[in-house]
Image (tube, grey):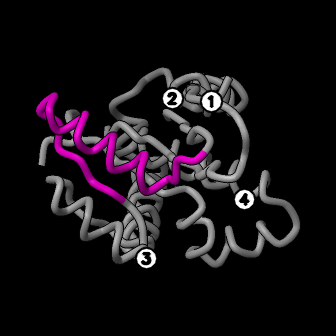
Amino acid sequence: MNRQSDVLLVDGYNIIGAWPELARLKETGLEEARDRLLDMLADYQGFTGLQVYVIFDAYRVPGLGATFRQYKITVVYTKEKETADECIERLVVQLTRRGRNIHVATSDMVEQHVAFGKGALRISARELLIDIGQNRKQINKTVSSDQIQKKNPLDGILSLDVRSRLERLRRGKD
C-alpha cells in the first residue's frame, strides 16, 4: 500500500462513540472528545503519511457546513440535511476518480458496505484504534532508540524544550 497517496475518511461521531476514551470524554463535553480524536489522528497521519479527513455530522444544524484544516487534517462538518454517511460516500466517489486509495473508518456496517461498493476499503473503529496504538508504540520505540542519537548529531545538543517545539511544528500543531 502506497500510504502517501492513500486517504483515510473517518466518521467522526461514530468513532467517538466507539472508542472508550472518547466516549467517556463525550459525557463531559463533545468538544473535548472531538479535539482528542483530532489529536490522535494528527499523530497517526504524521506517522503513516495517510491524508486524513474527519467528517462530523451536522445533519440537524442549519447552515452550509464547513471544511477547514486542523493539525494538517481536513475537518468537514456536513451541510444542513446532509449526513456524515452521505458526505463520506460523496468524498469516496470524488477521491477515487483522482486515483486515490480510499479507506473509510466507521463501525456502521451499512456505511462500510456502501463505501466498499463505491471502491473504498473498510476499517472498523476497533481496527483503527488498534492500528493507532501500534503506531504509537512504534513511535515511542523509535524515539527512545539509540539509533536516533547516532543518526542525528543535533539531538545530543538540543534541549528537550527546543526538540518538543520542533516536533510540534513538524506536526502542524503550532
Residue hosting label 3: 126
- Compare marks 2 and 4 and give the one earlier in the sequence: 4
Question: Answer yes or no: do the residues labelled 2 and 1 have beta carbons within 8 Å?
Answer: no
Q: Residues within 10 Å of mark 4 (few under 14, many from 20)?
A: many
Instruction: Please state if 156 lies on the left or on the right of 131 as rendered.
Output: right
Q: Which residues are magenta?
A: 81-104
Residue hosting label 2: 72
- Compare marks 2 and 1 and give the one earlier in the sequence: 1
Q: Is residue 66 visible?
A: yes
Question: Answer yes or no: do the residues labelled 3 and 4 have beta carbons within 8 Å?
Answer: no
Residue hosting label 1: 64
Q: Secondary structure at mark 2?
A: loop
Q: Quadrant of residue 167?
A: top right
Q: Secondary structure at mark 1?
A: loop
Q: Residues within 10 Å of mark 3 (few under 14, many from 20)?
A: some
Nearer to us of marks 2 and 1 is 1
Question: Answer yes or no: do the residues labelled 3 and 2 have beta carbons within 8 Å?
Answer: no
Q: Nearer the viewer, residue 157 or 93?
A: 93
Q: Determine which of the numbered discs, if any, sits on residue 33 in the image.
A: 4
Say whether residue 87 is magenta: yes
- Residue 169: x and y in percent read 59, 22
